[in-house]
Amino acid sequence: MNIDISLQLFKLKSLSKRGWILALVSVFCLLTLNACNPSNFKTQAAQVSQLVYSITAEPKTFNLVLSKESPNVFGAIYEGMLAENGVTAELEPALAESWKDEGQKITFTLRKDLKWSDGKPLTADDVVFSFNDIYTNKQIPTSIRDVLAIGTKGLFPSVRKISDRTIEVTSPEPFAPLLRTVGGLPILPKHALESTLKNKDASGNLQFLSTWDTGTNPKTVVCNGPFVLDSYKTSERVVFKRNPYYWRRDAQGKQLPYLERMVWQIVENADTALMQFRSGGLDMLEVAPRNFSLLKKEEKRGDFTIYDGGADQAAIFISFNQNAGGRNGKPFVNPIKSRWFRNKEFRQAIAYAIDRPTMLTNVYRGIGELQYSATFSGSPFYLSPEKGLRAYDYNPAKAKESLLKGGFKYNEKGQLLDKDGNRIRFNLMAPTGSRTGEIVASQMKLDLEKIGIQMDFQQLDFGVMGDKLGNSFDWEAYFGAVGGGGIDPNGAANFWAVNGEFRPFNQAPTAGQAAVQGRIVEPWEEEIGRLYIEGAQELDENKRKEIYWKTQRIAAEELPYIHLFNPRSLAAIRNKVTNVKYSSYGGLLWNVYEIKVNGK
């Protein structure tokens, strides 16, 4: 899911807005229009059936397992045994032609004669390798492991080969999302990666951890999706070409995908992307609501159509660093400020002080909805304010009451102080180039001044910001967006598990990181983590709803994330591009294998 082109929802399947992994999304930096004008590239390939699209940041890796950012290339080049329909969210056959679900045991049957992009056979050995050697390998830092963990002991499904085409998956305990989770995870090539798990580099790390980085020749990345990587030019483009061994065929027996090539222009500035689309350089564009009126007037002249995919999946929020720990005797957060951030009444006061309706108007021209939960509003497990989720209406007076209740006080100038007389002042960070972040921060600064708080704003390179959130833990507050984990809340397990791979408000060290001293996990954090385990093990859907609703009630009370609003998912698509099935859930390219560009 892409929002405003300045924020992007990270999905494991980056071409869609669905995903098993929940993580930070954002973009950064500026580009000039001439630096990567896609019309120049299109001219070079005028006779080739290709689609030209834009992405908002450089890919960080070509190694699917190590990826934590969006945009990424993996939705185009990998598939799992099953696929989700991007409109209905129903599971459909992919690498597996069929499956037998017996609750805690599922048997998958692979299609005949599957091949990798290098022509080597794709068999049950690759499936077993992907799960047993990669995904559940604790030497590899990956969020995928969090969504596979079952029960309080964090056990993993047993994945074993029955024959070259048959795989049996057994859950050690009841696990409601077993089919959706195991079936949807991409399958990786054993013949290309097995040796990287047996050998180490000069630093003693597995070679796998440095395999297929962005310095790799893209042509050497072995995959099984509709496309393969063809080339990558930093700050300009990623080029894909059709996988000659892809398994799908249309009703007439023609091998898919229809497109011979797909070009992703790296356009990190939203205004530049808009200009490129209007000038004909891009075939499709995710439309920021603020640009809707402008583009709507140009539909006929520009020979394109704007589609409304419904409420976006992204939950836009601000969050405070509640990690009380540190490394080498140095705390991550100034202890004085840490006490503020870990004070529930402080966080609730911030939530009351923010004028969300005005923000929504200023950022998205009102084309969107207020948001109070990280769960995707299209999920059956979403709890709305109408059904009991606590909401925070704009109320500065109530914000001040909350602050006084939390032990804060005001001086004669109306400035907010803590009980020791320290002025309340903090820094909010957002990615460079995020126009949404700039608008939100500008209004937040004014809103918080009304309750005596001084907020500073800092925009950082996305890589620097990502390092702070996931490695150094050195930050105070940040603006970002997350996805709701898809239809099933277990997709967000890494976001809520006490030791999850992406839980920035109180992050534990992940594989290969230095230990943290003094980290405190509050009872409510443990309770949400426990409920996520319980919810995944409950097979009755109505009971599962009650469990996940409870997690949302706790989160709305404790506010590890202060949610703001969601936009509508809007996309402009050239009329020459057909077979696109756009939705907020699936995104623009979830069915890229059957998209056509007419006239070539």
Image: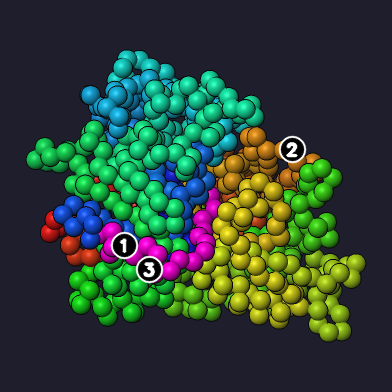
Camera-nearest label, 1 or 2? 1
Q: How crowded is mark 1: few (under 14 residues within 10 Å), some or many (20 or more)?
A: many
Question: Which of 88/196 is in front?
Answer: 196
Q: Does the magenta stretch include residue 43?
A: no
Depicted 405 relative to depicted 123: above or below: below
- Residue 162: x %, y % from top left: 35, 15
Name the disc covering residue 34, or none: 3
In the structure shown, which secondary structural element does the residue marked by tag 3 occupy? helix
Distance from the alpha carbon under mark 1 to that under mark 3 = 9 Å
Where are the magenta residues, as a range? 19-42
Position of 598 relative to 572 (above/below): above
Q: Name the residue under label 1.
A: 38
Q: What amino acid is found at the position of numbered circle 3 in the picture?
A: Asn
Disc 1 is placed on an element classified as helix
Residue 25 belongs to magenta span: yes
Task: State the separation of the CA atoms marked 1 and 2.
Answer: 46 Å
Q: In which quarter of the image is the N terminus?
A: bottom left
Residue topped by disc 2: 515
Residue 14 falls left or right of residue 296:
right
Q: How far apart are marks 3 and 2 (CA)?
A: 46 Å
Q: Which of marks 3 and 2 is nearer the N terminus?
A: 3
Q: Is mark 2 on a helix, strand or loop?
A: loop
